[in-house]
Image (cartoon, grey):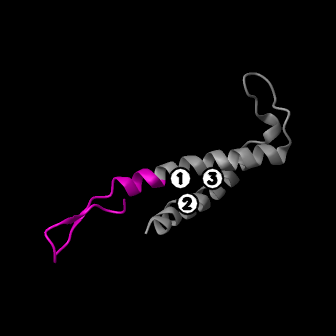
Amino acid sequence: MKYRLLIWILWPSFLVAGMAEGLLFTVIHPQDLLFFGHHPDISDEGIYTIGFLMIWIFCAVSSALAAYILPGIEAPDTKGVDRGLL
């Protein structure tokens, strides 16, 4: 169950991160980015990779928080409560 939960969190966040990176770098070119007033000495592909990974991390954290706060479901056969996905 834990591996399935990991896939439920990482796969949708991967897809959304891909779309978000496409939209972000359609508007902003990596050569236009400044970090603390300086252009980083990284290739455009490196900027794309770092941007994708950062967006993916934020999306994965969002998906994990959504999975964490899902309400539990009362099981009809038992007196216990299913505590949701986690």
Residue assigned mark 2: 10
Q: Give the range drawn in magenta.
A: 63-86
Of 85 and 39, nearer the camera is 85
| Three-letter amino acid code at the position of disc 2 | Leu
Residue 74 x/y as whole percent: 19, 67
Residue at x 60%, y 62% (from the top left corner): 15
Depicted 64 relative to depicted 43: above or below: below
In the image, 85: left or right of 79? right
Q: Is mark 2 on a helix, strand or loop?
A: helix
Please name the residue shown 31% across and 62% down the image. Answer: 84
Percent x, y for residue 38?
Answer: 80, 24
Q: Of circles 2 and 3, which is in front? A: 2
> Which numbered disc flags the more N-terminal residue, 2 or 3?
2
Residue under the image location 73 percent in, 50 percent down: 26
In the rendered structure, does residue 35 fall within the stretch colored magenta?
Answer: no
| Residue type at the position of mark 1 | Ala
Identity of the amino acid at label 3? Answer: Ala
Q: Residue furthest top?
A: 37
Crowding around mark 2 (Cα neighbors within 10 Å: few <14, some 14 to 19, many 20+) is: some
Which quadrant would the N terminus be assigned to in this image? bottom left
User: Which residue is disc 1 drawn over?
Assistant: 60
